[in-house]
Amino acid sequence: MTRVAAIDCGTNSIRLLIADVDPETGELKDLARRMTIVRLGQDVDRTGRLAPEALERTFAACREYAAAIKEHGAEKVRFVATSASRDAENRADFVRGVLDILGVEPVVISGDQEAEFSFTGATQELRASPLRTPYLVADIGGGSTELVVGTEQVRAARSVDIGCVRMTERHLVRGGAISDPPTSAQIDAIKADIEAALDLAERTVPLTEAQTLVGLAGSVTTVAAIALGLAEYDSTAIHHTRVPIDQVREITERLLRSTHAERAAIPVMHPGRVDVIAAGALILLHLMERIGAQEVVVSEHDILDGIAFHTALDD
């Protein structure tokens, strides 16, 4: 077993996994998992730059994670940064800050690399299951969505610029405030962006050939938690839950009709997702409708697990 620390820094959240990994079997034993909403991608779609306050929130989380990594004695550490830091003009400030705190330079990966890590993390356990292949793994993040089709290996992948934060900031923010609830015109604008992105993805990824849709990340797991009627967030209960499309549609429509206070009152709702969950659920719903999926298999194992597995394999 190799003890590794994997950090995934996305547009909305930063997450840490410390695990013992067997590189030969792929077995992964969790020692610690943490998630912090830092909204690194705050206003990046509009300004092209990482905001100073967003950087400071991220660095504060990095300091906490550095202490946990030291406590557990991880042998290898990998920090992967995704959509927001790919897009930012001042990403050198981000890289320098992370290096100073954690002693490793963040690897700003491409959308294709992000897709490969997500696919590995999501499907490693499913390969012994009776679920039909090929899989379509959909990682709905804050700034982008990764769509990956494959069986044991990635067959085709595409990263498209639709995510819960990006869609919210682009279409639902007016005068510095989020429309609450959104208007029909605003919802239609999000739907148009989603459909255009799926059109783009279908040029290279055979979305409709997939036999099993596997959904990842906070928007999907939150929808699953709502579907299960959980009194509090329970990753064990959510992992590998199968949510039918009718339930996804009902939850999405309810979220789009809700006010901030009503969404915040949902027991499983993380405070950092209250304003962006409706857009994330809408992406999931439109993807399911596009490919004719009758259900989504929800995975709590995702890009973070894929990063940990690949880190253990590296010499």
Image (spheres, helix red, strand yellow):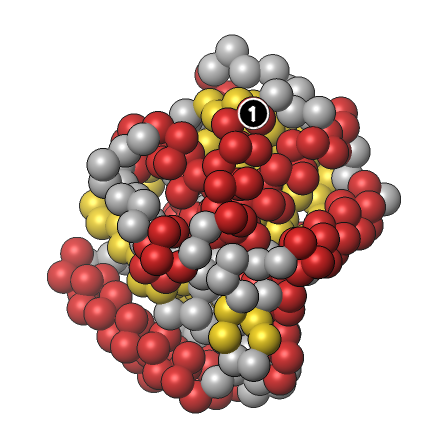
Viewer can see residue 124: no
Rendered view: 57 above or below 158: below
The answer to which quarter of the image holds residue 38 is bottom left
Q: Nearer the viewer, residue 75 or 144?
A: 144
**Is label 1 in a helix, a strand or a loop?**
helix
Which residue lies at the image location 62% right of the left edge and 84% below the top edge? 47
Q: Amino acid at mark 1?
A: Asp
Which residue lies at the image location 53% right of the left edge and 36% below the top edge? 215
Which residue lies at the image location 76% right of the left edge and 47% below the top edge? 195
> Which quadrant, please, contains the N terminus?
top left
Q: Nearer the viewer, residue 17 or 28?
A: 17
Residue at the outermost right position:
203
From the viewer's perspective, is 103 left or right of 209? left
Rendered view: 222 above or below 168: above
Indicate the position of residue 109 as horizontal and vertical percent values: 58, 63
Which residue lies at the image location 46% right of the left edge and 81% below the top edge? 94
> Which quadrant, please, contains the C terminus?
bottom left
Residue at the outermost top position:
130
Residue indicated by mark 1: 246
Indicate the position of residue 84 as horizontal and vertical percent values: 56, 70
Query: How many marks do you count on the picture?
Result: 1
From the viewer's perspective, is 224 left or right of 266? right
Indicate the position of residue 118 as horizontal and vertical percent values: 53, 44
Viewer can see residue 58: yes
Q: Nearer the viewer, residue 253 or 241?
A: 253
Indicate the position of residue 284 as horizontal and vertical percent values: 59, 40
Q: Quick one: label 1, few (<14), some, or many (20+) residues within 10 Å? A: few
Rendered view: 298 above or below 32: above
